[in-house]
Image: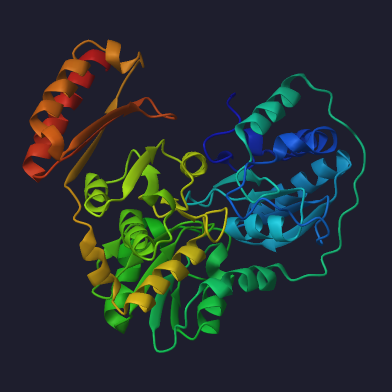
Amino acid sequence: MGGLFGTDGIRGRAGRGALAPRAVARIAQAVGQLLRKDPAILSSKAPRGFEKLRADGPGRGRVLIGRDTRASGPSIERALAAGFAAAGVGVVRAGVLSTPGVAALTRAWGCALGAVISASHNPAHDNGIKFFSPQGLKMPDGAEEAIELLLVDGELPTRRGAPAPLTRKPLDDYLDILAPFGPSLKGLTLAVDCAHGASSATARPLLERLGARVIVVNASPDGRNINAGCGALHPEKIARVVRREKADLGVAFDGDADRAIFVDETGEVRDGDHVLAVCGTHLDERRRLPRRTVVSTVMANFGLGRALAARGIRLLRARVGDRYVAEEMLRAGAVLGGEQSGHMLFFDASPAGDGLLTTLRVLGVMAERGEPLSRLSRILVKYPQTLLNVPVTRKPPLEEAGGVPKAVASAEKVLGADGRILVRYSGTEPLCRVMVEGPRAGMVRRLARAVADAVRRELA
């Protein structure tokens, strides 16, 4: 695939390159041409139970566009809408709506496609575009490749499509989809960090509807403060609120609200590995974990695999990126997967990752078991981990990089079955990442430095 799409759509500095208005309009024209001529290429294989699509919803045949709270969002939205119109495709503008909200309503409203304008956890000066298939999943690789080919070689159309009047309330419909997955939260105090992002308008009403007392911070977006020192990348902020308010649980979302990082009632941060351990074992005990399989990525802590294996649950590791987790889940027939970063997938409830849904599922386990998250999280003992980023000037196959394979083999011999080492190139930077996990922090640091030194000697 070319250079336009990354692992999570198009992303970069707002107003420049692929995110300049004219470029955005051309991208929409290319997507619109595919919609008119070969719509099947935009469809995804859906998890079991989500195969059937609504054909008569308010968005039928149109593209649903939502955006997060960045100041650049409205201009990108206008350019997308103009490009789709030029391709003869109508749009429905939802305004500020989370990434999972767009995914959910694309499916529920019978839309031909969903488009999200967001750069997720990136700072406000960045933005991006990601597309969702009619099934509510990330657009397939084949569709992205076809779009890139059209932009390079294709003749783009110049028709006109009519905008669709929006008679439904997107936020209300989205919350109506989520609410049935939540337990009664009566008597609970929850602390929520919205990162001045898309969850600013949805987190409080959803959790209060279920009966919780909700303390919300960083929910005053001004277009420039999204993710600024807050949210999922800074869970220590909500941890202070949890301790001060004696809350039962804290949760921090990122700017587009597709990931959630938790803080238990003691103020301890609990990431995606904890969610997979807690929810995976709970589902398994309730016989609701098909094939007794959980999917994560190569970055999942070694302790997660150990904790699940001790209970007879298999952990599969995919490439980094929620789309690759989803692909592996579909191959394996799994219903639970996710990343250490807090992006979770519950295929028994939704085809898309959703920070609010993840929050409801964690609260559901707490309610069913009558235990706080601190006690539930004891199931996972994290192994010490060291991650070093080594600058490189070239990227040959690592198995051909002189002394690097020998250094890796030496480290693996020391770790044995009680740890692991991962050496990989960054996909976007001139870096080689060296990650080592093991039972003792001193050993892990020493082995990581030895491998990093070998990388530096060969590739710097």
Q: Quadrant of residue 414?
A: top left
Give the quadrant of the C terminus: top left
Q: Position of residue 423 (x, y in %)?
A: 28, 28
Q: Is residue 13 left or right of residue 173?
A: left
Quarter-wise, where is residue 271 in the image?
bottom left
Give the residue at x 27% y 77%: 243
Q: Is residue 27 above or below residue 214?
A: above
Give coordinates of residue 351: x percent, y percent: 57, 53
Q: Toward the viewer: 14 or 406?
A: 406
Name the image quarter holding the N terminus: top right
Q: Quadrant of residue 278?
A: bottom left
Tell me which residue sits at (78%, 38%) in the image: 39
Left or right: residue 265 compared with residue 188 = left
Say if 401 sits above or below 277 in the image.
Answer: above
Residue 22 visible in image: no
From the top left corner, tell me how far across and down residue 60 is, in percent.
82, 54
Does any portion of residue 92 appear in the rendered image? Answer: yes
Q: Measured from the top left, where is residue 129 in percent x and y?
A: 63, 44
